[in-house]
Image (cartoon, grey):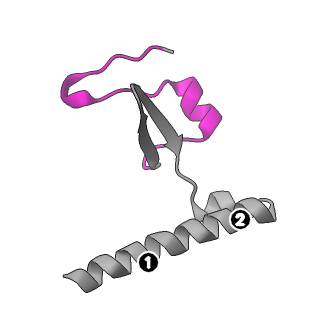
Amino acid sequence: MEVKVHKKGIIVIPAEVRRRLNIKEGSVVELEIEGDKIILKRKMTLLDAYGIDKEMGDSAVKELVKLRKEEVEKENSV
């Protein structure tokens, strides 16, 4: 799909993509750069993780623990 870059670098994610990935106002997406590519991923929330298989749930918990450790390190370095 093609999207246009507007003033201040704003792009609009097409409605079809938002519906398919359950992206709504206030959703958080992750942006990654791989070479000359920009990759957007919907960030998983705890609600997303509820009821999913154990392997994926464990992955979500590990990510939360990692993020919390980073927050604690930032707080302690101030």
Judge whether 17 appears above or below 66 on screen: above
| Res. 55 mark | none
Q: Identify which residue is drawn at 60% across, 70% down.
A: 62
Q: Which residue is mark 2?
A: 57
Q: Main secondary structure of the magenta part?
A: loop
Q: Amino acid at mark 2?
A: Gly
Q: Secondary structure at mark 1?
A: helix
In the image as oriented, which residue stretches furthest toward the bottom?
76
Judge whether 53 appears above or below 70 on screen: above
Q: Quadrant of the C terminus?
A: bottom left
Judge whether 34 appears above or below 30 on screen: above
Whether residue 4 is in magenta: the answer is yes
Q: Secondary structure at mark 2?
A: helix
The foreground one among 3 and 31 is 31
Horizontal placement of 45 versus 28: left or right?
Answer: right
Residue count near mark 2 (Cα–Cα under 10 Å), binned few <14, some 14–19, many ≥20: some
Whether residue 48 is in magenta: the answer is no
Residue count near mark 1 (Cα–Cα under 10 Å), binned few <14, some 14–19, many ≥20: few
When asked about the image quadrant of residue 54, the answer is bottom right
Q: Which residue is mark 1?
A: 69
Report the mark closest to the observer, 1 or 2: 1
Judge whether 5 appears above or below 40 on screen: above
Magenta extent: 2-26
In the image as oriented, which residue stretches furthest toward the top?
2
Q: Amino acid at mark 1?
A: Lys
Q: Identify which residue is drawn at 58% across, 55% down.
A: 44
Q: Position of residue 36 (x, y in %)?
A: 39, 25
When asked about the image quadrant of residue 18, the answer is top right
The foreground one among 61 and 25 is 61
Q: Which comes before the other along the chain, label 1 or label 2? A: 2
When asked about the image quadrant of residue 76, the answer is bottom left
